[in-house]
Image (cartoon, rainbow, N blue to C red):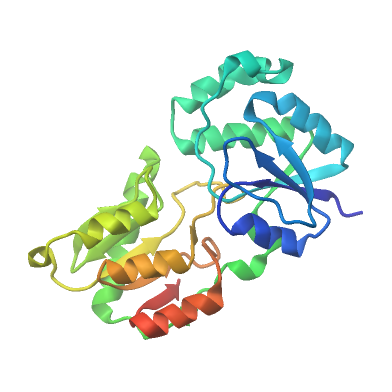
């Protein structure tokens, strides 16, 4: 028997895409997060301060699996509103919140597992959202582009133990930008402001998971906005890790690649 799914919705299009694939899913939104449920979805409104109530609601709905979907920033918690479950979890959560995102997300996932829920990844529900190795959209990258991608991958791998980010931009062997807490779009805006005198050639953005990253709840993602920002930042293309990056709205991405002369490569 298929377990009922709950979509823990953050911002962006991904939660809606998952609900389209699993129409019987319970769509959970959290206070303070800009996520609107589809009109025909079974909706639960939740609060981070009252996780006990959420767990009870999910069990009552027959939920056996949960998926974390969309951007969700660290909430500002009000201890006065904690329910009994949250009071018990607070010491562990507060300690994790003082560390990196990976540590916090792993703890949150383990809390749901302790409550009897299986945590699944978005790519398990919509496997077509990841690209296979060798998939190329747009023009073929040049040899120099692939060398820049190699360099960017090494940067991400080197920074993985520090839990910094999932993206880097390299142009002509020079590191032009590293993704941090502010996200990919902020990095690309920074890169776009780089003086022309510092560019050796058009750059390449690489998006891939950090080493050891749990893809069930923190898989990197790109979409049309990413490609448009890459074009505005004078990049030649984007390289993603095959099977490990969510690639949203692929038909629109193909149009943007054609219009902007960008390549999108999975490897």
Does 169 sit left or right of 163 as displayed?
left
Location of residue 250 with respect to 33 vertically, above or below: below
Image quadrant in which you'd find residue 230: bottom left
Does 138 sit left or right of 5 as displayed?
left
Which of these two is toward me, 166 or 184? 184
Residue 131 position in % (x across, y down)? 55, 71
* Residue at the image point whose x is 64% and y is 18% from the top: 81
Residue 253 position in % (x across, y down)? 48, 75
Image quadrant holding the C terminus, namely bottom left
Does the rendering let one see residue 110?
Answer: yes
Pick out the residue farthest to the left: 197
Image quadrant holding the N terminus, namely bottom right
Does the rendering let one see residue 134?
Answer: no
Location of residue 88 with respect to 135 vertically, above or below: above
Residue 118 position in % (x across, y down)? 75, 43
Pick out the residue farthest to the right: 1
Which of these two is toward me, 4 or 150? 4
Does 236 sit left or right of 75 as displayed?
left
* Residue at the image point whose x is 64% and y is 24% from the top: 49
Residue 138 position in % (x across, y down)? 41, 84
Q: How many marks?
A: 0
* Residue at the image point whose x is 35% and y is 78% from the top: 262
């Amino acid at each position: 028997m298929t377990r009922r799914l709950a979509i823990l919705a953050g911002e962006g299009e991904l939660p809606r895409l998952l609900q389209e694939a699993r129409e019987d899913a319970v769509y959970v939104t959290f206070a303070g997060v800009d996520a609107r449920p589809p009109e025909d979805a079974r909706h639960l409104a939740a609060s981070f301060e009252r996780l006990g109530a959420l767990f009870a609601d999910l069990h009552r709905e027959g939920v056996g699996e949960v998926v974390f979907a969309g951007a969700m920033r660290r909430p500002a918690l009000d201890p006065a509103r904690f329910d009994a479950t949250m009071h018990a979890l607070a010491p562990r959560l507060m300690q994790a919140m003082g560390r990196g995102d990976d540590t916090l997300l792993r703890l949150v996932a383990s809390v749901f597992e302790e409550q009897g829920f299986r945590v699944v990844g978005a790519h398990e529900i919509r496997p077509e959202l990841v690209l296979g190795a060798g998939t190329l959209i747009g023009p073929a990258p040049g040899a120099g582009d692939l060398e820049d991608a190699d360099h960017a991958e090494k940067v991400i791998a080197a920074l993985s133990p520090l839990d910094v980010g999932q993206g880097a931009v390299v142009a002509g062997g020079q590191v032009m930008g590293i993704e941090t807490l502010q996200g990919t779009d902020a990095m690309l805006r920074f890169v776009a402001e780089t003086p022309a005198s510092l560019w050796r050639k058009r750059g390449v953005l690489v998006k891939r998971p950090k080493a050891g990253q749990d893809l069930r709840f923190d898989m990197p993602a790109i979409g049309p906005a990413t490609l448009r920002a890459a074009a505005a930042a004078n990049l030649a293309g984007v390289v993603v890790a095959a099977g490990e990056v969510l690639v949203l709205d692929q038909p629109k991405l193909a149009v943007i690649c054609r219009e902007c002369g960008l390549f999108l490569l999975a490897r």
